[in-house]
Image (cartoon, rainbow, N blue to C red):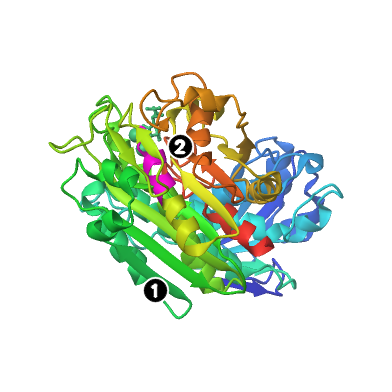
Amino acid sequence: MNILVKAISEQKIKTDALILIFFEGMSPDIYSDIDKVTGNLIKKIISSKEFIGKQNQLALLHVHNIPASRILLVGTGKQSDATSEKLRQAGGKAFSYLRDIGVRDIAISTRLFKQLPKNFLAHRKPAFYFLEGGLLSLYQFEKYKRTDEKPSDDKQIRTVNILGSDRDISLKWLQTTGSAVSFAKDLINTPSNDMTPAILGGIARSLSGKKLKVKVLEKKDIEKQGMGSYLSVAKGSDEPPKFIVMEYKGGKGAPVALIGKAITFDSGGISLKPADGMEKMKYDMAGGAAVLGVMKAAAELELPVNIVAILPATENLPGGSATRPGDIVTSITGKTIEIINTDAEGRLVLVDAIGYAIKHFRPKMIIDVATLTGACSVALGNEAMAMMGNNTELMDKLKISADETYERAWQMPLYDEYKEYLKSDTADIKNVGGRNGSLVTAGYFIKEFTADVPWAHLDIAGTAWNDKDKPYSPKGATGIGVRLLIDFLKEL
Ligand code: BES
Ligand code: ZN
Ligand code: ZN
């Protein structure tokens, strides 16, 4: 798609659809020059109250006397309540609507942005957010549609014209992060038969470049490293595990370690999950996919930081050699773990990946991203990820990026008392702490392997998947974590 900034007026631009943005209840006067020429249609629709500029409200007008063939009125709510997220959502609604009706070329008037209130706090230009929502909303996953259900290829927006003289809206950033989000979503939406650990490893390898080195440890290497906790999860599947290690060198000093849970299918193992909804467990590698998206974008944007990314990839299946509840395994740190429930496998693969990162890279901080617990959705629904960690400064920084990108993170406590929940009679620790507090005991389990390196854990179980469309995030994988972490790395 072509995105162009053009210093042309709304009345002169030739386009399929000209977007005019409105605050709720606003007088149409700021667009009166256009409206006069095209027959006062805007005034009419507003005085009839058919369109009042409510958040995400749309109204399409076919117009004459200007080169644009349509005008799309887009509401973004009350002027006094304007936020970057409201612009994102309005952009999402507008773009996906225009795509669906077959529009190919659009133009956005930026006039309204000059009237944003003083309390409109945002790091970037208003047009950035509107465009970001618009671009993200256009994502579609059609790889497996082979019939006429597949929307025709010509229903694609090809050109977006931003009207105005402000060229400084970080278009490269927008397009790179947007395509990293789509990349992650594609990986997550792909069914597990086509997204095995080996395939994921191949995809990681394909990202290698001058500053990005990728290696994939095989089962025998993983054994040699003593990652018995991770291997215990892989035992029940015929698909071999792949331990993916990526090193991006863009700056100086100790790297940031990003660890992504990459269970390409989670059946629960011997502690089998109920059949209902199990098909969704292909998204149990959403943390890993987000980390891959971040690495792709970091390399493309040449971020001036060092990053190591680790994806402990495996399936969690109940095969004949699967781990049994009650089994005790030894992690890379030497700590022994009693496996009470084989469905609490995420933490088992993460702690070995964290142990490996600490042993081989001495990272200055560790961030893990994981669809770790059902309890995360119970606590926060689909609105925020749960954040835990051992370092307030790191979590405060993540919170700023979470708010900026609206990939929201809500901090949960890791009280010392939770240690008691994870006491095993026979091993150093057990992998579940009971029903109560299972969101935070999962976090606490990981903390026990972080050796006091600054660490934060992001549980995205509730936010990695949409059961229904959201304004700029269609049904299916959300790619959450990609925009948050790239923003975080940029601020380092
Ligand atoms: N992958 C699941 C968590 C999950 C559930 C992610 C729903 C997305 C949607 C994880 O491996 C798991 O099964 N966790 C268990 C832990 C329990 C056995 C302590 C859970 O949350 O039920
Ligand atoms: Zn599980
Ligand atoms: Zn899982």
Viewer-nearest residue: 230 or 29: 230
Work out whether 8 lies above or below 49.
Answer: below
- Type of amino acid at the residue the image marks with label 1: Ser
The answer to whether the beta carbon of the residue marked 1 is less than 8 Å from any atom of ligand 3 is no
- Type of amino acid at the residue the image marks with label 2: Ala
Q: Determine which residue is flagged by label 2.
A: 461
Q: Secondary structure at mark 2?
A: loop
Residue 208, labelled with which disc?
Answer: 1
Q: Horizontal and vertical percent for residue 207?
A: 39, 70
Viewer-nearest residue: 335 or 453: 335
Q: Horizontal and vertical percent for residue 3?
A: 57, 70
Alpha-carbon distance for marks 1 and 2?
29 Å
Identify the residue at horizontal 54%, vertical 51% (top origin).
367
Determine whether, in the image, residue 240 is placed left or right of residue 385. Answer: left
* Quadrant of picture, ligand 3: top left
Tally of numbered discs = 2
Q: Residue furthest right?
A: 118
Q: Which residues are magenta?
A: 344-352
User: Is 349 one of the magenta-colored residues?
Assistant: yes
Viewer-nearest residue: 301 or 134: 301
Identify the residue at horizontal 42%, vertical 52% (top origin).
353
Dominant secondary structure (helix, strand or loop) of the stretch shown in magenta = helix
Q: Horizontal and vertical percent for residue 390?
A: 62, 42
The answer to whether the beta carbon of the residue marked 2 is less than 8 Å from any atom of ligand 1 is yes
